[in-house]
Image: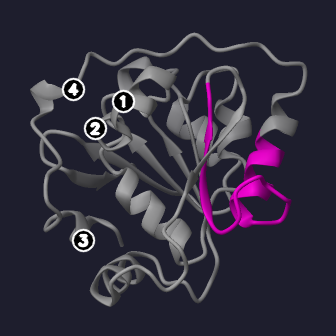
Amino acid sequence: MLEKLFGYLRKLGNASEYQALRMPDVDAVPDIEEVFAKARRAAAGDQPVEQKGRNVIVVTPGRLLMLQPCPAPGSMASNQVASVEGMISPKVKRNIAAIAYTELSGLRSDISKTIPFFGILRGFAYIGHAVWIFEGHGSALVAGCRDADVLIVDGAMVPHLQTDWSAAASSVMRSREIYVHDRATYSLRKET
């Protein structure tokens, strides 16, 4: 589904421009499932958030919810909306989880370089899908993937994930649609 679109998207930068990624240190919380339940509700627009409109939700390593607002409704160019809708139709609302580097310094300095496919994730949220991002730490992997229809993983984070990450993620997803993003080619491959 998504592979064909990523073939023509503009590469956001040279892979050597990116800092060496690592698994961020995360805070232990008493109920990680509740943190992600709140993230899913906020991403779906089912709970009041301080920013109105659609948002991509980033679950930080400190386990706070960071809202990344989408453009105002009706403000995206129709050709951009059509491209996003061509990847995942808005007719059926999907839960889309992403595993990416979520260290605050990277997110604050340039979120599009820190998460090269962030624009696509924002587009998914803009057209109505629930989108949340987290780092994929072993203490949060199952909770973070629970009830997702689609999972997109930054390939640069894969070496830092637990060895059975794909099996663990798919065991709690509603659909087993997992893609790994390659920063060097700006393409997706379906995880089997």
Disc 4 to disc 3, C-alpha distance: 23 Å
> Vertically, is 177 above or below 118?
below
Which residue is at a point 62% across and 22% down the rendered structure image?
A: 61
Q: Quadrant of residue 77?
A: bottom left
Residue with the mark numbered 2: 113
In the rendered structure, are the residues bearing label 1 and label 2 in contact, judged by CB atoms less than 8 Å apart? yes
On the rendered structure, is 60 left or right of 2? right
Disc 1 to disc 2, C-alpha distance: 9 Å
- Name the spot of residue 49 as percent of width and height, x first: 79, 54
Camera-side mark, 3 or 2: 2
Which residue is at a point 39% across and 26% down the rendered structure image?
A: 106
Residue with the mark numbered 1: 109
Residue with the mark numbered 4: 18
Disc 4 to disc 1, C-alpha distance: 12 Å
In the rendered structure, are the residues bearing label 2 and label 4 in contact, judged by CB atoms less than 8 Å apart? yes
Q: Earlier in the sequence, mark 1 or mark 3?
A: 3
Say if residue 109 shows up in the picture: yes
Specify the amino acid type for callout 2: Lys
Neighbour class for label 1 at 10 Å: few (<14), some, many (≥20)?
A: few
Please tell me the numbered disc located at residue 154: none
On the rendered structure, is 187 left or right of 89? left
Specify the amino acid type for callout 1: Ser
Q: Which residues are magenta?
A: 36-60
Which residue is at a point 72% across and 26% down the rendered structure image?
A: 63
Which residue is at a point 62% across and 29% down the rendered structure image?
A: 60
Question: Is residue 66 highlighted in magenta?
Answer: no
